[in-house]
Image (spheres, rainbow, N blue to C red):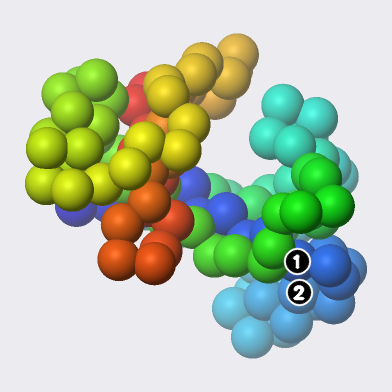
């Protein structure tokens, strides 16, 4: 299993990026409009961590891992069959891949397909 994208939604993007940069020696780039304005850093295994501000007033801070899957439709169907509630159906982000989000156990869970 691999986390392809670790999304961190926070009200203080610069402080979170600075802490990760100092503690983990990550280098964050400029905001990426395709990823909701997230500042991203490449991880050693080829995945990414993205830190962004909430996209709407009702969005709460969250840390959401997106697991890399070979077939996002099948993986999302399996999660739903296991009791997950689909929060966002698969959607392609040009140049990044396809993501989906489901809710289960009080947590957000993400899936990612390249």
Front-most of residues 34 and 80: 80
Q: Position of residue 11 (x, y in %)?
A: 84, 67
Identify the residue shown where x is 26% and y is 46%.
Answer: 84
Q: Position of residue 66 (x, y in %)?
A: 40, 47
Disc 1/disc 2 C-alpha distance (Å): 8 Å
Q: Which residue is mark 1?
A: 10
Q: Position of residue 25 (x, y in %)?
A: 64, 75
**Residue farthest bottom in this picture:** 23
Q: Position of residue 90 (x, y in %)?
A: 41, 21
Q: Quadrant of residue 79?
A: top left
Identify the residue shown where x is 75% and y is 66%.
Answer: 10
Q: Please tell me whether mark 2 sits on a helix, a strand or a loop.
A: helix
How crowded pointer 2 is (Cα within 10 Å; few <14, some 14-19, many 20+) is rated as some
Q: Residue 27, can we see it?
A: no
| Tag in front: 1 or 2 | 1
User: Going by the image, does 5 lie left or right of 95?
Assistant: left
Q: Relative to 105, does residue 114 appear above or below in the rendering?
A: above
Q: Which residue is mark 2?
A: 16
User: Going by the image, does 2 lie left or right of 114?
Assistant: left
Q: Relative to 95, does residue 75 appear above or below in the rendering?
A: below
Identify the residue shown where x is 18% and y is 48%.
Answer: 83
Q: Please tell me whether mark 1 sits on a helix, a strand or a loop.
A: loop
Q: Are marks 1 and 2 in contact (CB under 8 Å)?
A: yes
Q: Relative to 15, does residue 6 appear above or below in the rendering?
A: above
Q: How many marks?
A: 2
Among numbered discs 1 and 2, the one appearing first in the sequence: 1
Front-most of residues 69 and 10: 10
Mark number, residue 33? none
Identify the residue shown where x is 48% and y is 31%.
Answer: 88
């Amino acid at each position: 299993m691999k986390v392809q994208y670790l999304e961190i939604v926070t009200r203080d993007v610069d402080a979170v990026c600075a802490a990760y940069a100092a503690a983990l020696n990550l280098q964050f780039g400029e905001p990426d409009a395709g990823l909701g304005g997230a500042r991203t850093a490449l991880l050693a295994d080829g995945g990414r961590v993205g830190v962004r501000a909430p996209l709407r007033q009702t969005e709460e801070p969250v840390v959401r891992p997106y697991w890399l899957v070979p077939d996002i439709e099948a993986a999302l169907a399996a999660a739903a069959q296991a009791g997950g509630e689909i929060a966002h159906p698969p959607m392609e982000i040009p140049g990044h891949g396809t993501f989906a989000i489901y809710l289960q156990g009080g947590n957000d869970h993400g899936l990612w397909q390249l």
